[in-house]
């Protein structure tokens, strides 16, 4: 009962803020409500407060006791949705598939695939020494086991 009510309130709150989207939502046996959101332009404390108030102010604590936590995914959390890849075009990612591991720039998101580009040093085709080579790969989202944004300072 509580889960359905909170889900409805959450959907309504996110409809009014189209720049925000849901990553995770759970209600445990002790009525602890957990909401993890992300946004096209990131998530501020005010965004979390807004979503929290839209839920909390429409629930009656006299009816059911609950705790509520609304938070952002965080900068180091793995990317889960296509929308998260889209907002990170141009940034460096660490991407792991079943067969490969890439540290590359996210160049494009098209359909259900992402395009990565990076530079690497390879032996010269003729003679000694190495040469810098530009590499690219297109990966279907469903082949990615984990992708994280590389934070640089």
Image: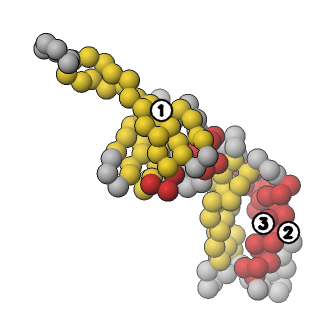
> Residue 4 appears at what percent x and percent y?
76, 79
Q: Quadrant of the N terminus?
A: bottom right
Residue 64: image location, x then y, percent? 77, 85
Residue at the far left: name it: 128
Of residues 48 and 24, the one nearer the viewer is 24
* Residue 103 percent location from the top left of the image: 39, 37
What residue would you read off at disc 2? 57
Mark 3 Cα shell of 10 Å, populated few (<14), some (14-19), many (≥20): some
How many numbered discs?
3
Q: Which mark is residue 36?
A: none
Closer mark to the observer between disc 1 and disc 3: 1
Please tell me how crowded label 1 is: few (under 14), some (14-19), or many (20+) other residues with Cα within 10 Å: many
Q: Residue at x 47, y 32 (%)?
A: 105
Please state which of the two labelled residues, at mark 3 or mark 2, is closer to the viewer.
Answer: 3
In this picture, is 119 found above or below 49? Answer: above
Is any part of residue 36 visible from this angle? yes
Are circles 3 and 2 on residues that touch, CB within 8 Å? no
On the question of residue 74 being in view, the answer is: no
Tell me where residue 136 sits by quadrant: top left
CA gap, disc 1 and disc 2: 42 Å
Q: Earlier in the sequence, mark 1 or mark 3?
A: 3
Q: Is residue 4 above or below residue 108?
A: below
Distance from Cα at disc 1 to Cα at disc 3: 34 Å
Q: Which residue is mark 1?
A: 105
Q: Residue at x 63, y 60 (%)?
A: 23
Relative to 2, 72 lies left or right: left
Q: Identify the residue at horizontal 35%, vertical 55% (top origin).
A: 98
Quote the CA–CA distance across marks 3 and 2. 12 Å
- Which residue position holds label 3? 10
Mark 1 or mark 2, whichever is nearer to me: 1
Q: Nearer the viewer, residue 71 or 20?
A: 20
Mark 2 Cα shell of 10 Å, populated few (<14), some (14-19), many (≥20): few
């Amino acid at each position: 009962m509580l889960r359905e009510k909170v889900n409805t309130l959450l959907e309504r709150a996110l409809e009014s803020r189209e720049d925000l989207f849901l990553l995770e939502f759970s209600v445990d046996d002790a009525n602890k409500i957990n909401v993890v959101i992300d946004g096209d332009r990131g998530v501020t404390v005010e965004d979390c407060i807004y979503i929290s108030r839209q839920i909390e102010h429409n629930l009656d604590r006299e009816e059911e006791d609950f705790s509520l936590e609304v938070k952002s995914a965080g900068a180091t959390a793995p990317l889960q949705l296509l929308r998260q890849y889209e907002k990170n075009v141009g940034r460096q990612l660490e991407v792991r598939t079943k067969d490969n591991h890439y540290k590359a720039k996210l160049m494009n998101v098209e359909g259900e695939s992402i395009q990565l580009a990076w530079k690497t040093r390879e032996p010269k085709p003729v003679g000694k020494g190495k040469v810098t080579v530009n590499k690219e790969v297109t990966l279907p989202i469903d082949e990615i086991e984990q992708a994280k944004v590389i934070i640089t300072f």
